[in-house]
Image (cartoon, coloured by chain):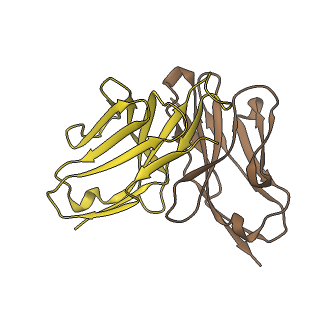
Chain colours: A brown, B yellow
Amino acid sequence: AQSVTQPDIHITVSEGASLELRCNYSYGATPYLFWYVQSPGQGLQLLLKYFSGDTLVQGIKGFEAEFKRSQSSFNLRKPSVHWSDAAEYFCAVGGFSNDYKLSFGAGTTVTVRA
Amino acid sequence: GAVVSQHPSWVICKSGTSVKIECRSLDFQATTMFWYRQFPKQSLMLMATSNEGSKATYEQGVEKDKFLINHASLTLSTLTVTSAHPEDSSFYICSARETLGQAVSGNTIYFGEGSWLTVV
């Protein structure tokens, strides 16, 4: 069975500070990993994805994530957050072995204070 | 990048009526689309997998006669909530898989903007 754990329900960070969102996954085969962002009342926007290759993945809006197989983790980072980064962030895992059905974590709400 | 569009963005319907939500992949062909449901302040729950030209595959606990899914073309899947009741009110989101060999991304899952359904 596949699953995703996002340990942090809510994170508050000051504008300009760095941000790290944790994601741990369980998947029986080679995982495809995704980070999505959702603003209130909106759909999901893909930030970045990992399929293979370089374990440090660059995404949009200045985000990056690092895949660590030994730790079953795919943490999302941003060096300097902007007020517009306040949103809900979801980590998801899927893959070829289950027809690419994605399992989502519970999400992490990011609040940015001035 | 690839775009998935949902329509309508929000809909209010009377209890007992049916409502249809469309999901379109605008610039790529998607043989597989997925329908999710999201309750307020919660994560997404997969309802069903929609495959072009074949029957949808429903997740355990999802009533296939209530949530009718049709994937008639490579760019369109529809979700029809039949005999809607207030407990069906939710945020419904579709996603489409951009398959390997098309465009640049390959096997990336893109999501629509979501559709708010309120049943009164």
Quadrant containing the C terminus of chain A is bottom right
User: A101 or B116, which lies in front?
Assistant: B116
Residue B26 image position (x, y, % from top left): 51, 41
Q: Quadrant of residue A65?
A: top right
Residue B56 image position (x, y, % from top left): 32, 30
Residue A45 image position (x, y, % from top left): 60, 51
Tell me which residue sits at (58%, 41%) in the image.
A4
Number of on-image labels: 0
User: A18 or B80, which lies in front?
Assistant: B80
Residue A72 image position (x, y, % from top left): 70, 34
Taking the view exactly as shown, the residue that stands out farthest to the bottom is: A114
Q: Is residue A24 left or right of residue A40?
A: right
Q: Quadrant of residue A39?
A: bottom right
Query: Relative to A97, does residue B14 appear above or below in the rendering?
Result: below
User: A88 or A11, which lies in front?
Assistant: A88
Taking the view exactly as shown, the residue that stands out farthest to the front is: B27
Q: Is residue B65 left or right of residue A72?
A: left
Query: Relative to B17, does residue A51 appear above or below in the rendering?
Result: above
Tell me which residue sits at (43%, 45%) in the image.
B45
Q: Is residue A94 left or right of residue A76?
A: left
Tell me which residue sits at (19%, 52%) in the image.
B18
Query: Relative to B53, does residue B69 appear above or below in the rendering?
Result: below
User: A81 or A22, which lies in front?
Assistant: A81
Tell me which residue sits at (31%, 44%) in the image.
B79
Q: Is residue B102 left or right of residue B90?
A: right
